């Protein structure tokens, strides 16, 4: 089939206006959020239903043309940037199909923006706890495909724990309808788990049933200055004990990140009086009488101040304060993006190893890249750090060898080179390096069984090669 025949066939399925070939309109969809990868595609196709996705996938499979699924294109491993073929964008599939408040579940199409799901849950007196900096533009299909983590994993788990059922278009166009809201279902393999975190390499997620929770009307939020990483970890354990596991977020932020954010937005320049190496943004959430959590937090932080576990603290006194403190945290990725050359990482470690790892990693950077500045932040409650090294020079040749040394250190501590952002095309080399031969072979066999023609997001996760880094 010629290129123009295929485009005509796709136009007949989704409508000509939803087959986009204009270079200007395509441009933002071919570059990743960090502007490090640039791809190319025959066209961007925007189907409006599972039936249309199925027909598009079938037409491409018959023509032997690859498909790259794309949600909000906020992914941080360039998994949604196509190298060839058709870019399948889910933005038109943006319906909230049903909210079952009593049953604590919600059925949505894959293209619904995460913030709209959170809002719909709130309107029904429920909580959908997935929360991340990109929530105003990422889509639930992308969240599921990347098994996104974010701020509330400590209490509610990763996206994987929040999905009850899925509908997926398989690489040959067949539809697997696994849209169930059952809490228990042990009829053989749990197939939805295969697609969660598969980054679009095994099929296109078109709908999902999500798990909702009772809303937590009480929130107490603070930013605290702590003298060390160990102190931050000790404070977390203590707060968990004394709040009945009420800590819903526990974000570690180093001084360099706070300074970078303050340069970005001056209102954060004098957040706390005390200059310590580390800060924590923490949130307690739960039910109970008005003000009770706030009181508990004040009392606990007062005690921690007396014992020098905490050097300084600012506790949000209003919803506006709470939003302002969280906005500071959400600004960090943007502030890190501004540097000329950056080693980025998204690593997971056993919590007991975090403090030792940070010391060793700083030592490594000091030795190998003395001019570099470490910018470290992350979801400490989950042992997940974004350990970055930035440099003002344009020279990027140091980044790759040093990141390998860093990942070797992570592996030595029993950790992971990818905690929550996935593999995409940015970390395929690391996957090949750090996964065992048995694991890699099993992953390849699964991929070959589901997508024998290798047309579903080829070059991502399992592929070798350099990707399309610009
Ligand atoms: P995209 O970027 O469009 O796609 C991501 C991957 O999923 C690609 O491989 C794509 O092919 C695939 N995909 C997308 N939709 C589908 C579908 N319907 N079916 C099958 N495959 C699909 N992540 C975290 O985990 N925690 C964080 O705290 C966090 N913070 C972030 C903060 C910022 C400022 C930004 C920009 C990103 C952050 N991320 C974070 C990255 C996170 O992975 C993404 O924001 C989000 O999960 C991806 O959703 P998306 O709709 O943008 O997906
Ligand atoms: Zn993160």
Image (cartoon, rainbow, N blue to C red):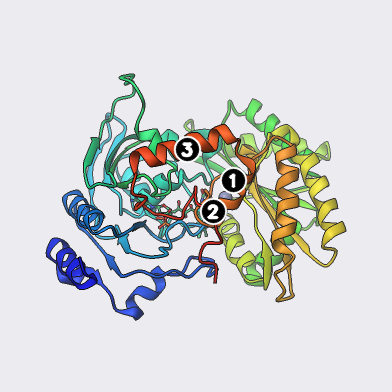
Q: Residues within 10 Å of mark 1 (few under 14, many from 20)?
A: some
Q: Is residue 317 visible?
A: no
Q: Residue 85, position in %: x, y?
A: 33, 64
Q: Residues within 10 Å of mark 3 (few under 14, many from 20)?
A: some
Q: Is residue 129 left or right of residue 104?
A: right
Q: Are marks 1 and 2 in contact (CB under 8 Å)?
A: yes
Mark 2 lies on residue? 464
Q: CA distance from mark 1 to mark 3?
A: 11 Å
Q: CA distance from mark 1 to mark 2?
A: 8 Å
Q: Nearer the viewer, residue 38 or 292?
A: 38
Q: Is residue 456 left or right of residue 291?
A: left
Of callouts 1 and 3, the N-terminal one? 1
Q: Is residue 320 left or right of residue 267?
A: left
Mark 1 lies on residue? 432
Of callouts 1 and 2, the N-terminal one? 1
Image: 390 above or below 443: below
Mark 3 lies on residue? 443
Q: Residue 18, position in %: x, y?
A: 21, 68
**Ligand 1 closer than 8 Å to the CB at disc 2?**
no
Q: Nearer the viewer, residue 84 or 26?
A: 84
Quarter of image, res 335: bottom right
SS under mark 3: helix
| Residue depicted at 41% across the width and 56% down the height | 138
Q: Residue 313, position in %: x, y?
A: 72, 48
**Ligand 1 closer than 8 Å to the CB at disc 3?**
no
């Amino acid at each position: 089939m010629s290129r123009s025949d295929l485009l005509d066939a796709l136009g007949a399925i989704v409508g000509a206006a939803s087959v986009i070939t204009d270079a200007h309109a395509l441009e933002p969809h071919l570059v990743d959020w960090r502007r490090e990868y640039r791809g190319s595609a025959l066209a961007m196709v925007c189907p409006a239903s599972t039936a249309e996705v199925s027909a598009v996938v079938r037409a491409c499979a018959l023509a032997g043309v690859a498909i790259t699924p794309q949600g909000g294109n906020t992914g941080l491993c360039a998994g949604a940037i196509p190298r060839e073929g058709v870019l399948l964008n889910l933005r038109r599939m943006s319906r909230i199909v049903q909210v079952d408040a009593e049953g604590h579940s919600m059925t949505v199409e894959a293209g619904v923006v995460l913030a709209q799901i959170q809002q719909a849950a709130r309107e029904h007196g429920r909580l959908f706890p997935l929360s991340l900096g990109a929530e105003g533009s990422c889509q639930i299909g992308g969240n599921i495909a990347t098994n996104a983590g974010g701020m509330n994993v400590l209490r509610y788990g990763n996206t994987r724990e929040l999905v009850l059922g899925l509908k997926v278009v398989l690489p040959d166009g067949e539809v697997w309808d696994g849209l169930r809201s059952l809490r228990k279902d042990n009829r053989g393999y749990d197939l939805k788990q295969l697609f969660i975190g598969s980054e679009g390499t095994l099929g296109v997620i078109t709908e999902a049933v999500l798990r909702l929770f009772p809303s937590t009307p009480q929130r107490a939020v603070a930013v605290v200055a702590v003298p060390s990483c160990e102190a931050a970890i000790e404070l977390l354990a203590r707060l968990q004990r004394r709040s009945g596991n009420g800590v819903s977020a526990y974000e570690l932020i180093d001084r360099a990140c706070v300074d970078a954010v303050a340069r970005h937005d001056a209102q954060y320049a004098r957040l706390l009086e005390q200059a310590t190496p580390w800060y924590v943004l923490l949130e307690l959430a739960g039910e109970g009488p008005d003000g009770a959590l706030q009181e508990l937090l004040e009392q606990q932080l007062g005690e921690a101040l007396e014992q020098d576990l905490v050097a300084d603290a600012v506790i949000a006194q209003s919803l506006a304060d709470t939003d302002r403190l969280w906005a500071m945290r959400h600004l960090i990725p943007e502030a890190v993006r501004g540097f000329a050359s950056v080693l980025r990482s998204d690593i997971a470690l056993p919590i007991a190893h975090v403090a030792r790892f940070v010391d060793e990693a700083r030592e490594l950077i000091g030795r190998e890249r003395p001019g570099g500045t470490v910018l470290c932040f992350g979801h400490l409650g989950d042992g997940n750090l974004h350990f970055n090294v930035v440099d003002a020079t344009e020279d990027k040749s140091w980044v790759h060898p040093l990141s390998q040394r860093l990942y070797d250190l992570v592996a030595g501590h029993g950790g992971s080179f990818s905690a929550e952002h996935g593999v995409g095309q940015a970390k395929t080399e690391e996957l090949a390096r750090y996964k065992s031969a048995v694991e890699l072979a099993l992953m390849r066999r699964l991929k070959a069984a589901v997508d024998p023609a290798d047309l579903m997001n080829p070059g991502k996760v399992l592929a070798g090669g350099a990707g399309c880094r610009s």
